[in-house]
């Protein structure tokens, strides 16, 4: 087997492990059990700001020294992050039974460092992983398989996330720290899988440019109006996709509280909820390219935006078990949009700037969401808890943001129709370069 194909096959395993984050169902509950709501939101805002600092340099490193080494660094940072978040309360001398309190600067700082390490770990793989996948197939002369393989990657990512969520929610009912221990073990496994890969990039395909010139080359790609529109869409949807992600845990907790459910039921409920969410997303992701072939790229993107806008709007409008059920679809927009977007963008960007461009694209969205989080934090009174009253006003403001985004995408769809529909890497490249 060609080394490029072997690396592409190993990438499928890597994708499964990369999304196996056992802490996803309970991270908000974990932080809120020890810190007040404003500090929990600050931790999330700090995470996204740290990504802002590392995202583009990490992509440039991937273009300059190679994809494989960059992913190894990312896996090591993720392992360090999960280990610190697991041991944080013990290192700070804080009991898990103490409840949320202000003034725990030691614990907040430890959690902030852990969030920063997680941000760096994700930044080092963001963009570089997709670039490695495309480069490996290109080296084997099989770049035409990229869209279909990306759909399989999406399916595997969400299936890995579903299983991790189910296990994470279960062990969190015993101890809220245990999901981070399991995530640490998976990060070590990721490191081992990347060790088995081979670097697909050659010396000729690696950039020699310094970071400012590299960024300028990326921005020059916007001469293609289609690439500029897709760049803006990715940034916008990262904001919308993360709003339900940030608030679904306290929302479910509020619904369970109205029903009189025991507190221990919350990690179990959120774990099961996230598992089903990611399982549904795995189905959607696996069929995303077929859907793109049927209704076009912007048709898929409009569907993703509409579904997420509906979810956010109903979350802000009412506290209901019906909305909890609707939240099972909250990851489907990301699942159906990502493979078509990767197919449309990745092969259209020169290999020497590919990882940097994808990182810059991700950076724009993360920066936008970081600013959104800080603005939403300002709407929360000091010392407020993470109950329904504390998050309702933030969700109402988020609904307005989602509504404006949906109108913008529908306008683009009306103007462009099925143009730039991304019917495969080589075809997309020619279309986007016109």
Image (spheres, rainbow, N blue to C red):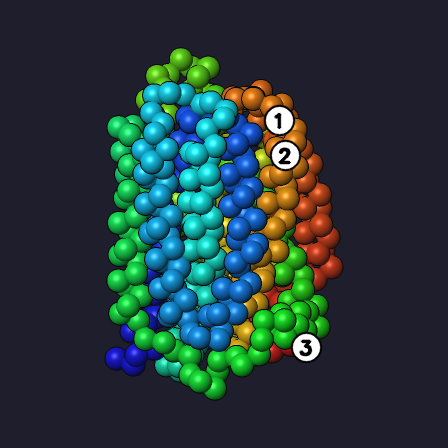
The percent coordinates of residue 432 (x first, y second) are 63, 73
Q: Give whichever of 5, 290 is nearer the camera.
A: 5
Residue 434 got which mark?
Answer: 3
Displayed quadrant of residue 313: top right
Q: Label 1 near label 2: C-beta < 8 Å?
A: yes
Q: Which residue is drawn at 45% across and 61% down?
A: 124
Residue sitting at the far bottom = 204
**For marks 3 and 1 on the same chain, the one whose residue lies earlier in the sequence:** 1
Mark 2 neighbour density, 10 Å: few (under 14) some (14–19) many (20 or more): some
Mark 1 neighbour density, 10 Å: few (under 14) some (14–19) many (20 or more): many
Displayed quadrant of residue 189: bottom left
The residue at which mark 2 appears reads as: 376
Residue sitting at the far top = 260
Q: Which residue is drawn at 28% across and 68% down?
A: 195
Q: Give whichever of 350, 157 is nearer the camera.
A: 350
The residue at which mark 1 appears reads as: 380
What distance separates the C-alpha of mark 3 from that of mark 1?
48 Å
Q: Does residue 65 appear in the picture of this structure?
A: yes
**For marks 2 and 3 on the same chain, the one whose residue lies earlier in the sequence:** 2
Task: Indicate whether 231 appears above or below 236.
Answer: below
Mark 3 neighbour density, 10 Å: few (under 14) some (14–19) many (20 or more): few
Pair 2/3: label in front: 2
The percent coordinates of residue 39 (x first, y second) are 52, 32
């Amino acid at each position: 087997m060609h080394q490029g194909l072997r690396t592409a096959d190993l990438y499928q395993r890597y994708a499964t492990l990369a999304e196996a984050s056992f802490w996803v169902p309970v991270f908000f509950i974990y932080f809120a059990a020890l810190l007040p709501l404003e500090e929990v939101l600050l931790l999330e805002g700090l995470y996204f700001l740290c990504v802002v600092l590392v995202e583009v340099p990490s992509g440039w490193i991937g273009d300059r020294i190679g994809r494989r080494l960059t992913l190894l660094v990312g896996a090591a940072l993720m392992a360090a992050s999960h280990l610190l978040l697991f041991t944080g309360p013990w290192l700070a001398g804080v009991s898990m039974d103490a409840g949320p309190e202000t003034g725990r600067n030691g614990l907040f700082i430890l959690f902030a460092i852990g969030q920063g390490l997680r941000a760096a770990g994700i930044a080092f793989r963001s963009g570089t992983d997709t670039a490695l996948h495309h480069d490996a197939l290109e080296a084997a002369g099989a770049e035409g398989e990229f869209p279909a393989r990306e759909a399989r990657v999406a399916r595997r990512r969400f299936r890995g996330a579903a299983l991790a969520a189910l296990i994470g929610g279960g062990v969190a009912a015993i101890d809220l720290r245990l999901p981070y221990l399991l995530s640490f073990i998976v990060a070590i496994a990721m490191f081992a899988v990347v060790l088995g890969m081979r670097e697909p990039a050659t010396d000729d395909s690696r950039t020699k440019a310094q970071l400012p010139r590299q960024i300028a080359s990326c921005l020059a790609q916007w001469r293609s109006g289609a690439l500029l529109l897709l760049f803006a869409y990715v940034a916008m949807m990262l904001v919308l996709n993360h709003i339900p992600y940030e608030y679904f845990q306290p929302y479910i907790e509020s619904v369970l509280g109205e029903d009189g459910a025991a507190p221990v039921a919350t990690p179990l409920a959120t774990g099961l909820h996230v598992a089903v969410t990611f399982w549904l997303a795995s189905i959607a992701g696996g069929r995303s390219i077929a859907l793109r072939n049927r209704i076009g790229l912007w048709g898929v993107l409009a569907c993703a935006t509409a579904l997420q806008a509906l979810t956010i709007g109903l979350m802000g409008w009412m506290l209901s078990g019906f909305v909890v059920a609707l939240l099972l679809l909250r990851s489907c927009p990301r699942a159906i949009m990502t493979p078509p977007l990767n197919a449309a963008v990745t092969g259209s960007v020169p290999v020497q700037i590919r990882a940097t461009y994808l990182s810059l694209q991700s950076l724009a969205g993360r920066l936008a969401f970081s600013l959104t989080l800080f603005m939403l934090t300002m709407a929360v009174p000091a010392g407020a808890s993470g109950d329904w009253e504390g998050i309702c006003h933030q969700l109402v403001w988020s609904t307005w943001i989602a509504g404006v985004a949906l109108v913008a995408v529908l306008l683009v769809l009306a103007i462009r129709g099925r143009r730039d529909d991304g019917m495969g890497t080589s075809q997309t490249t020619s279309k986007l370069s016109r």
